[in-house]
Amino acid sequence: MGEAYRFPLRVVDGLRLERSLREVLLPGRVLYDDAGHAHTLPRYFYEVPSWEHAMNIQLSQSFALWELIQTDVREAGPLRGFPRYVPCSITMLALCLERFRDAVGTFVHIAANGGYRSPRHAVNTGTTAHSWGTAVNIYRIGDVQLDDREAIERYAALARQTLPGVWTRPFGSARGQTDDQLHLDFGYVVSVPHDAPADSLGFEAERRAS
């Protein structure tokens, strides 16, 4: 038998990263949504060594890593270069997107800043699943631009039919709505891979994350 496949990115404990990175990733920190519900941010991340790695790593048959981490100058400074850190749940997001692509039968185009965004990204207006690596903004499907009610609501309905439990933003221009993209949100999922560092950092380090 051949060697078992091993995912090419190293898993790191966010609490062990240097301070400048901890201050923007906020590993293990608790954030509150608009309803006052508490959600714990990811502690474990994949370390992406370079843009070349991001371009070459396929998370699923149709989606490469770069598509889910493409940000602009509104991302926090320490995360504009490399190595870059992305929550381990990004792999599950890619699998959900693959299933959605099968349902639509054509290419699915993800917006810049539309995949993973750190909690310190300037686009964020509150607690968002983008900071868990479990939400995505899609601006085009095949040749269809998602910039009107009919297109957005049609594909949102298909997403809900295809992906049990997914939440889609309603059409509109108010906060929490969308009028120029399809927002798919899988909630505040935290992934801890089997090869994540297992040793405890002790009470003080755990308290620093809270």
Image (spheres, grey):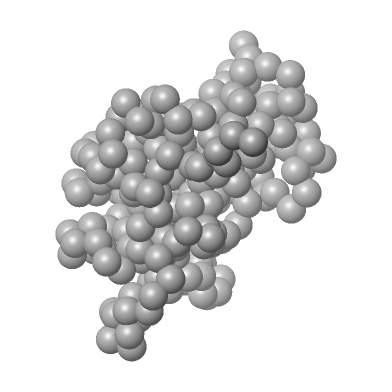
Identify the residue at horizontal 74%, vertical 26% (top origin): 102
> Residue 144 location in percent, x, y?
63, 16
> Residue 140 location in percent, x, y?
57, 21
| 192 shown above or below 121 | below
Identify the residue at horizontal 52%, vertical 58% (top origin): 193
Outermost residue to the front: 1
Most foreground residue, 193 or 102: 193
Question: Splitting the image into 4 quarters, where does residue 42 fall?
Answer: bottom left
The answer, for residue 116, to whether it is visible in the render is yes
> Residue 131 location in percent, x, y?
44, 54
Left or right placement of residue 74 versus residue 153 in this view: left
Left or right placement of residue 141 versus residue 12 in this view: right
| 72 shown above or below 177 | above
Where, quadrant-wise, is the C terminus in this rendering?
bottom left
Where, quadrant-wise, is the N terminus in this rendering?
top right
The answer, for residue 125, to whether it is visible in the render is no
Left or right placement of residue 119 versus residue 178 in this view: left
